[in-house]
Image (tube, grey):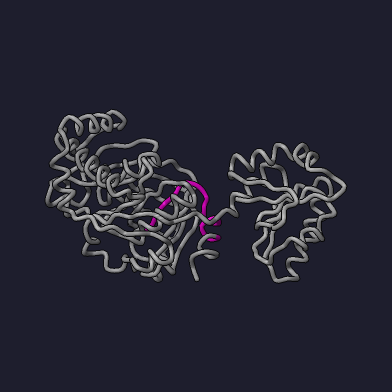
Amino acid sequence: MKINILRSSFQTDEFVWNEYAELIDRLKNEFQAEIQINGNELSNYVMIATGGVENLFKTLFTGKGPVNLIADGRNNSLAAALEILTWLGEQDVEGRILHGTNNEIVSALAETVCTPSLQGRIGLFGEPSDWLIASGVDRDYLLEHFGVETIDIDLQRLIDGIKAVPQAEAVKVAQAIVKRSLDTIEPSCADMVEAAKAYIAIKKICQEERLDAMTIRCFDIVNTCGTTSCLALALLNDEGIVAGCEGDMQTLMSMFLVKRLCGAEAFMANPSQLTDKTTMLAHCTIPLKMCDDITIRSHFESGIGVAIQGVLPTTDYTIFKWGGPKLDRYFVTEAQAVETPYSNHFCRTQITLNVDLRPYLLHNSIGNHHVIIKGKHAEQLKRYMDEFVIF
């Protein structure tokens, strides 16, 4: 990020460095900002250090918006920023002023930095599950518009990889997971080891193929290997490889965007119970980082292998889905968890949020799976989608 600082001819560069030392240091450290004072050409981020720079801004401005004007108010900076903002409006150029304390300016600036690169490699371990009839993505469009390359991984390669994992290596992983869990209910020691082998094998392929994200046709692994990928997906998400279920590319892209834009792990889940006040979502895998506690369970539908029953904190969450074959639709809202229940009628990890999603889900839903993120990220996601994605 380049940030231009403008000062009047009545002040010096030394004055600017000293006067705004703390803020400049934070801009450098938190945004890797390249700072230039009274340069030859302006970027989209301009810090107004003093008054009397309005004509200088007009002379250097290249005509490209939006323009973010940083002005804390000292040295008549806010007055100058207001004049510049009005002039930008007259040129039909979008602009905004980031004003306040250093903390407020940094926070506001973080919200404007909404252009993370989605470029990367995604591995598709097998075809999407048969029941996902509306969750595919045009892969050529994905590459052309977002720079996302999709790599097909033959499931037989994974099956062979699972068989090749050394027993001792898998035992070590299994023991570590058991140690960090509250309890192990259905799975045996042998089940834990087989699930650990799946994790090790999937991770090895991700490393070999340099994958940033992956999704898997899970049930073929259940039927062929007698184990599940639920544990593997939980651990991979914890380690920064975005990992989704059932070959659902739209939900995987939702998770991928959340990771790149918000820096957050996402819980991919099924909406399962709806009332006029709450929405409950559930699934059998979740990033362990999101949970207060975990219990090791079997996979809900099959009763086989290893799944995660996570207990999530009752805090603020964002519900998000990016979908459509050309990724031209999205839904986002915020809610608070009212409980993290458990019922044997649903997938193992369950969360109830205080939001009525019936109008959206029952009439205009973007597929089945949605993602849940800790914290309030709706405005950040909306801004990114509206400015850079939804054409």
User: Does the image show residue 248?
Assistant: yes
Q: Is residue 71 left or right of residue 327?
A: right
- Choose between 349 and 366: the one closer to the eye: 366
Q: Is residue 207 left or right of residue 333?
A: left
- Choose between 56 and 74: the one closer to the eye: 56
Residue at 83% x, 50% y is 8
Q: How many marks?
A: 0
* Picture layout, residue 65 above or below residue 283: below
- Choose between 124 and 353: the one closer to the eye: 124
Residue at 50% x, 47% y is 375
Residue 25 pos. (x, y %)? 66, 38
Q: Is residue 382 magenta?
A: yes
Residue 249 pos. (x, y %)? 33, 60
* Picture layout, residue 360 above or below residue 285: below
Residue 357 pos. (x, y %)? 43, 61
Residue at 31% x, 41% y is 235
User: Does the image show residue 359?
Assistant: no
Q: Which residues are magenta?
A: 370-383
- Choose between 320 and 44: the one closer to the eye: 44
Residue 277 pos. (x, y %)? 45, 57
Residue at 27% x, 68% y is 133
